[in-house]
Image (cartoon, helix red, strand yellow):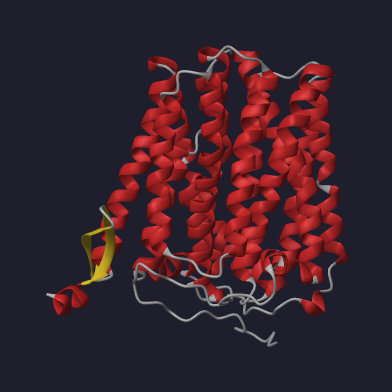
């Protein structure tokens, strides 16, 4: 297995609605296919440390939202907190990608993970001392966002250095499965801690949880990492990354789609707190249950994505459209149990959209540009939150939780339809309809095939 510079280079794709992964289908049985990346020691260490810190992160997220709601009684304030945490990604995200392409990613992660842990400990001290105010939460949320500007592209692109090109898609999917597994545990633990001993202890455990990824990074064998050529220091690297993406329809349109969905369709902290408090009038325990149900669906989606050996943009578009439809259905649910059950497929499809777009973009990008491209991806996906969260928080406060949730689902659905039509046009495809066994079928077919058939 080559580990020299450019060893995991990816060929340039022509724009198409069917972009297959380079790794092909992995050999072995179902279990081996799904968890094949864990055979690599460095990735096992990374995975183990991440599940500990991810659990702490989810505990802190749930506790932070509930703390802000308790201090202010406003869903808009929860939206402001979320917006401040993602605002740095919108403002400085592309610069984080330049840094990730220029410096060793393992060293960057050692610094960023330590900084994230310190932020968690600071919020724990403020809360346990009884002196916490909402502006403290706002400030720490912003500081977390500043650290994430570098941490996110470094962590996203470090995966390829640990596993190589053939296992990249599987590792990206397992990272998401890791995050969602922690989401199953974190909210439940947070709910118990909030009700039992208070929010401060949840923040304290989150801060301490970052010791695990720091230990995993220190224990890695650097000689086993896949060497990737780093971008030299120079002018115009940011513009170079933007030009690279602008000239690649197979990169730019998936990024546009996840941008709309991330900005308007992923505002669950706002909607779940509002539905828990204002619509169904349930407490912190039920709020934690809603997050756990969504995480269960997301985990199933991540494991299914790890099993798949290809990345298809057609599936990305269809999944995004169904995701929007289910959000609208959940928003109109008359009963708590129906709302809760719909969160499972919503979590599954939302995670599938993210993984499919993430892996398609990484696999189609040259390794020397990957940090900048993924920083643009994360800037669009997460950086839109400072726009979407306050806007939909205001809609939720003004017109009600149901209207806010419907708006997010409708925008996601519209974005999926428009991007699907654009990709079909760019890829030289047309919509073909036919009847099969008494049912209509709709699919995309190359114009040349339609002409031949005619």
The quadrant in which the C terminus is found is bottom left
Residue 191 occupies quadrant: top right
Report the front residue among 5 and 194.
Answer: 194
User: Residue drawn 58% across and 51% down?
Assistant: 301
Give the image quarter of residue 42: bottom right
Q: Is residue 126 left or right of residue 142?
A: right
- In the displayed structure image, the side of residue 222 where residue 432 appears, left or right: left
Q: Which sits in the foreground, 387 or 274?
A: 274
Establish if 165 lies above or below 289.
below
Q: Nearer the viewer, residue 437 or 265?
A: 437
Q: Is residue 322 above or below residue 343?
A: below
Q: Position of residue 425 (x, y in %)?
A: 23, 65
The residue lying at 79 percent from left, 41 percent from top is 118
Residue at screen point 51% across, 69% down: 310
Left or right of residue 340, residue 391 in this image: left
Q: Is residue 395 visible?
A: no
Horizontal and vertical percent position of residue 294: 59, 37
Q: Where 275 falls versus 452 (above or below)?
A: above
Q: Residue at x 70, y 78 (%)?
A: 226
x then y, percent, for residue 257: 39, 52
């Amino acid at each position: 297995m080559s580990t020299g510079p450019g060893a995991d280079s990816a060929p340039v794709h022509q724009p198409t609605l069917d972009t297959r992964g380079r790794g092909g289908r992995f050999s072995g049985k179902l279990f081996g296919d799904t968890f094949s990346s864990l055979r690599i020691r460095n990735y096992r260490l990374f995975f183990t440390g991440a599940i500990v810190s991810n659990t702490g992160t989810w505990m802190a997220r749930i506790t932070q939202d509930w703390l802000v709601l308790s201090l202010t009684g406003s869903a808009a304030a929860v939206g402001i907190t979320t917006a401040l945490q993602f605002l740095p990604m919108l403002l400085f995200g592309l610069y984080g990608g330049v840094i990730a392409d220029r410096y060793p990613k393992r060293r960057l992660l050692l610094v960023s993970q330590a900084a994230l842990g310190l932020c968690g400990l600071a919020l724990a001290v403020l809360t346990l001392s009884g002196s916490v105010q909402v502006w403290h939460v706002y400030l720490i949320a912003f500081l977390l966002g500043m650290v994430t500007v570098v941490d996110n592209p470094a962590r996203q692109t470090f995966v390829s250095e640990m596993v190589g090109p053939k296992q990249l898609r599987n590792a990206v999917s397992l990272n998401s499965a890791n995050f969602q597994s922690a989401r199953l545990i974190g909210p439940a633990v947070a709910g118990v801690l909030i009700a039992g001993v208070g929010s401060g202890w949840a923040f304290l455990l989150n801060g301490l949880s970052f010791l695990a990824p720091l230990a995993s990074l220190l224990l890695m064998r650097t000689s086993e990492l896949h060497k990737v050529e780093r971008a030299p220091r120079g002018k115009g690297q940011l513009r170079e990354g933007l030009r690279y993406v602008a000239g690649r329809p197979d990169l730019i349109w998936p990024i546009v789609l996840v941008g709309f969905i991330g900005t308007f369709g992923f505002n669950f902290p706002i909607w779940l707190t509002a539905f828990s408090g204002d619509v169904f009038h349930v407490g912190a325990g039920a709020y934690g249950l809603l997050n756990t149900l969504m995480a269960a669906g997301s985990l199933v989606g991540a494991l299914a994505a790890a099993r798949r050996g290809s990345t298809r943009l057609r599936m990305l578009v269809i999944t995004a459209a169904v995701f929007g439809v289910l959000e609208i259905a959940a928003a109109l649910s008359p009963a708590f149990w129906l709302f809760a059950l719909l969160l499972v497929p919503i979590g599954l499809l939302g995670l599938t959209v993210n993984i499919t777009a993430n892996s398609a973009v990484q696999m189609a990008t040259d390794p020397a540009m990957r940090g900048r491209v993924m920083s643009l991806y994360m800037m669009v996906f997460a950086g839109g939150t400072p726009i979407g969260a306050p806007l939909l928080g205001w809609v939720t406060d003004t017109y009600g939780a149901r209207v806010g949730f419907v708006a997010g689902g409708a925008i996601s659905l519209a974005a999926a339809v428009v991007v699907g039509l654009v990709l079909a046009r760019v890829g030289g495809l047309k919509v073909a309809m036919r009847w099969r066994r008494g049912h209509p079928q709709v699919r995309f077919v190359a114009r040349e095939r339609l002409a031949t058939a005619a």
